[in-house]
Image (spheres, rainbow, N blue to C red):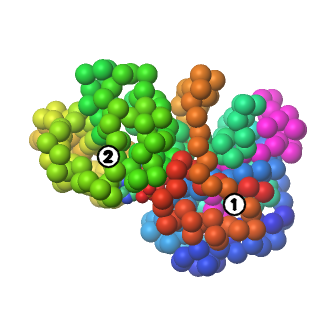
Amino acid sequence: MKTIAYNMFGGTEVLQTIDEPTPSIQADQVLVKIKAVSINPLDWKIRKGEMKLMSGSKFPKHTGTDFAGVIEEVGSSVTTFKKGDEVFGIVKNNMKEGALGEYVAVPATSVWKKPAAISFAQAASIPTVGGAAVAAFQKMGKINSQSHILINGATGGFGMFLLQLLKPTGANVTAVTSTNGVAYAKEWGATSVVDYKKENILSRKTTYDVVIDLSGKMGYKNAKQIMKPQALFLNPVPQPIDIPTTLIQNLFRSKKHIALITAPSEKSINLLLQGIDKGLTIEVGKVFPFTQTQEAYQYAEKGGYIGKVVIEL
Ligand SMILES: NC(=O)c1ccc[n+]([C@@H]2O[C@H](COP(=O)([O-])OP(=O)(O)OC[C@H]3O[C@@H](n4cnc5c(N)ncnc54)[C@H](OP(=O)(O)O)[C@@H]3O)[C@@H](O)[C@H]2O)c1
């Protein structure tokens, strides 16, 4: 089968199409014929060698965490799926394996039935950022119409799901986005939108109960200026050192810094599937063919897209 692999850490130029044997499956696994793989920022952080501690330095490496496709084969103990089912899912360990190829073998517990109403590209956009958005939403605690929330970097994949999860709560949600995201942020439920290319959110006098920084550029030190006394700062891109240090420092401060590490769960995916039934939208900003994988990553890494960037096979 054709798959994408790389033999050294680096830029998009290290991504190569290679031939390798179609994976064989174990009793608890399914073999999925891939139709679409969405791009996540983590893909290129691993490829650039920024996650070496977890990914190791053994090559070749594969890429792509979230996929959608059609079940080709089921393991002997799998009763939940059959050949031909349309599914979406996630590779079990994205530090060591990748879905961007013609087939992937994963545990049956790592895939879910694709709703008929959405495309393969939309389904492949769900797991990582959808699961993270549910986890972030739950970390926020009790949210109601009195709550003031700031989402910095609101119109990528994570923000798209988080805005729509917050909408029914009636909370006051300020979305910070670039110019082309303004209309999308409003449509997804932001009550106020700030274009970061025109205004620095830190210079506003407003303070928030929750600040979540999806751009990775604000940091707790800056966020503190716009946090209410008991507010939370949710950080989905913590440095490894932040994980123990924030736990200790939070004991002595009222403005908490929460390092957010998430993985999609059965519960979070089911909640998103219920949302999709009720009209939650998934915007795929751009689709590339498999033959343009390098271009797809170049485009995604430049930023400026709305929702997700997807590669189709
Ligand atoms: N901890 C976890 O479990 C977990 C799970 C999923 C994702 N993440 C991380 O969460 C982050 C967000 O994920 P994502 O998939 O939504 O990424 P994304 O699609 O790249 O979205 C990031 C957003 O930040 C915006 N942005 C860039 N510079 C900004 C600035 N100076 N001020 C305000 N906004 C700015 C971007 O807008 P423009 O492109 O228009 O400039 C973009 O919409 C990523 O770093 C990802 O790795 C963590």
How crowded is the residue under tag 1: few (<14 C-alpha within 10 Å), some, or many (20+)?
some
Q: Residue at x 14, y 42 (%)?
A: 205
What's the amino acid at mark 1?
Answer: Phe
Report the span colored magenta. 61-86
Q: Nearer the viewer, mark 1 or mark 2?
A: 2
What's the amino acid at mark 2?
Answer: Val
Q: Secondary structure at mark 2?
A: strand
Q: Quadrant of the C terminus?
A: bottom right
Q: Secondary structure at mark 1?
A: strand
Q: Residue 143: where, in percent of width, then height?
A: 32, 24
Q: Residue at x 86, y 45 (%)?
A: 72
Closer to the camera in the image, 10 or 8? 10
Q: Residue at x 60, y 61 (%)?
A: 96
Task: Tell me where residue 172 sits by quadrant.
Answer: top left
Q: Is residue 120 above or below residue 7?
A: above
Q: Residue under label 1, please give it.
A: 288
Q: Residue 198: where, in percent of width, then height?
A: 29, 56
Q: Residue under label 2, please give it.
A: 194
Q: Residue 133: where, in percent of width, then height?
A: 46, 38
Marks 1 and 2: CB-CB under 8 Å?
A: no
Q: Is residue 30 left or right of residue 39?
A: right
Q: Quadrant of the N terminus?
A: bottom right
Residue 154 shows in this picture:
yes
Closer to the camera in the image, 256 or 58? 256
Is disc 2's CB within 8 Å of ligand 1?
no
Say whether residue 77 is magenta.
Answer: yes
Q: Residue at x 26, y 31 (%)?
A: 148
Q: Residue 103: where, in percent of width, then height?
A: 79, 55
Q: Is residue 249 above or below residue 197?
A: above
